[in-house]
Image (cartoon, rainbow, N blue to C red):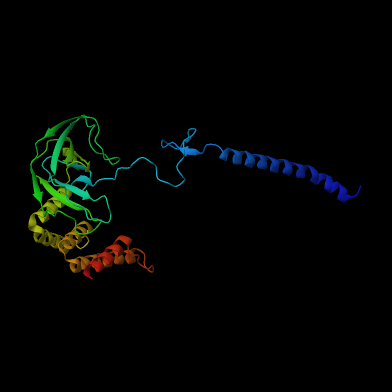
């Protein structure tokens, strides 16, 4: 027996296995084609489980919208305390409340509702309120707390640009005792309000943060020039005071002084690069992205 016959006999079992596998694939394809002639599979609408159309029922063509009408989302309002949906403060510390109104359409500017009522509710058991996930109130016992709220800044009815949010602010004039609170906006029908959570405790006291919040409130009360002067003095006394310089840049931008804000940011960039060169001689300094983006934004504001 020569080597050619021996190799042919080795290949025959493999060829038979391939033929059998191909036959199985063909049978499966024929079975699937036969099933397509029956009732089609439709999505059930709950989860990802499909269901078969009832006999005699005409299925909707693929790619068409479901028959059920969908309700368009309405405008939203997110409440923030001291700039956050979840805030911590100490008794007697300055507090401000914001309502951020957002339009349901990115092509339209946000508009304020006809009426806004803020409610501060003391939460018993520390169960209700707003957390970082969901922004929805829980089911703990609650009791409305009298709170004096003083309007801050302007009250425009419509945002300045399409897609931009509209922000209204209030200063909380009455002191809150230690405890957990929910701050909610009561709005006309059709709005989707999202409350904020505030925890008041002596352990949350932070002098530097209280001063920052107080300066924000003073600026919205019309004393921004005084705030800018105070921060400029702090930066002049300590050029490495990063917190004061960044806060000064924010207030200069809000005061419509982009050139002065840009000068402060450029000086900050220079000092950061000098510090990098001192720590790593011979290496090219790297400008942080947030500074580059800030400079681009300020340059666009000047055009």
Residue 116 lies, in percent from the top left, at 13, 44
Residue 171 lies, in percent from the top left, at 11, 47
Residue 151 lies, in percent from the top left, at 9, 49
Question: Quick one: which residue is furthest to the right in this view?
Answer: 1
* Occupied quadrant, residue 74: top left
Task: Judge from the rendering whether residue 161 lies leftward or rightward of residue 227; answer left or right.
Answer: right
Task: Judge from the rendering whether residue 164 lies leftward or rightward of residue 153; answer left or right.
Answer: right
Question: Quick one: which residue is furthest to the bottom in this view?
Answer: 303
- At a point 22% along the width and 69% down the height, the residue shown is 302
Q: Which of 30 and 162 is in front in this view?
A: 30
- At a point 7% along the width and 41% down the height, the residue shown is 148
| Total numbered badges shown on the rendered structure | 0
Q: Nearer the viewer, residue 26 or 213?
A: 26
- At a point 80% along the width and 44% down the height, the residue shown is 12
* Occupied quadrant, residue 29: top right
Task: Judge from the rendering whether residue 277 lies leftward or rightward of residue 88; answer left or right.
Answer: right
Work out which quarter of the rendered image holds the C terminus and state it. Answer: bottom left
Q: In this view, does 83 lie above or below 186?
A: below
Question: Quick one: which residue is furthest to the front in this view?
Answer: 56
Q: Nearer the viewer, residue 37 or 232?
A: 37
- At a point 14% along the width and 38% down the height, the residue shown is 120
Residue 235 lies, in percent from the top left, at 17, 62
């Amino acid at each position: 027996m020569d080597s050619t016959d021996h190799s042919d006999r080795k290949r025959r079992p493999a060829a038979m296995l391939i033929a059998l596998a191909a036959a199985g694939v063909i049978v499966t394809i024929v079975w699937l084609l036969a099933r397509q002639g029956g009732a089609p599979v439709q999505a059930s609408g709950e989860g990802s489980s499909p269901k078969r159309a009832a006999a005699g029922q005409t299925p909707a063509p693929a790619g068409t919208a479901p028959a059920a009408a969908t309700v368009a989302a309405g405008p939203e309002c997110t409440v923030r305390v001291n700039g956050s949906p979840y805030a911590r403060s100490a008794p007697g510390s300055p507090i401000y409340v914001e309502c951020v109104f957002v339009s349901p359409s990115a092509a339209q500017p946000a508009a304020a509702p006809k009426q806004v009522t803020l409610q501060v509710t003391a939460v018993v058991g520390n169960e209700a309120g707003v957390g970082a996930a969901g922004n929805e109130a829980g089911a703990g016992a609650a009791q409305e707390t009298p709170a004096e709220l003083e309007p801050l800044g302007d009250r425009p009815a419509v945002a300045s640009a399409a897609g931009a949010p509209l922000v209204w602010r209030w200063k909380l004039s009455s002191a809150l005792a230690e405890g957990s609170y929910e701050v909610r906006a009561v709005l006309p029908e059709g709005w989707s309000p999202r409350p904020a959570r505030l925890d008041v405790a002596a352990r949350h006291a932070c002098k530097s943060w209280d001063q920052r919040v107080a300066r924000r409130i003073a600026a919205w009360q019309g004393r921004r020039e005084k705030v800018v002067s105070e921060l400029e003095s702090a930066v002049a006394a300590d050029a490495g005071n990063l917190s004061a310089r960044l806060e000064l840049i924010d207030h200069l931008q809000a005061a419509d002084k982009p050139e002065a804000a840009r000068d402060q940011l450029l000086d900050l960039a220079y000092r950061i690069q000098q510090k990098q060169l001192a720590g790593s001689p011979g290496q090219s300094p790297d400008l942080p992205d947030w500074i580059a983006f800030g400079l681009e934004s300020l340059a666009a504001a000047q055009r």
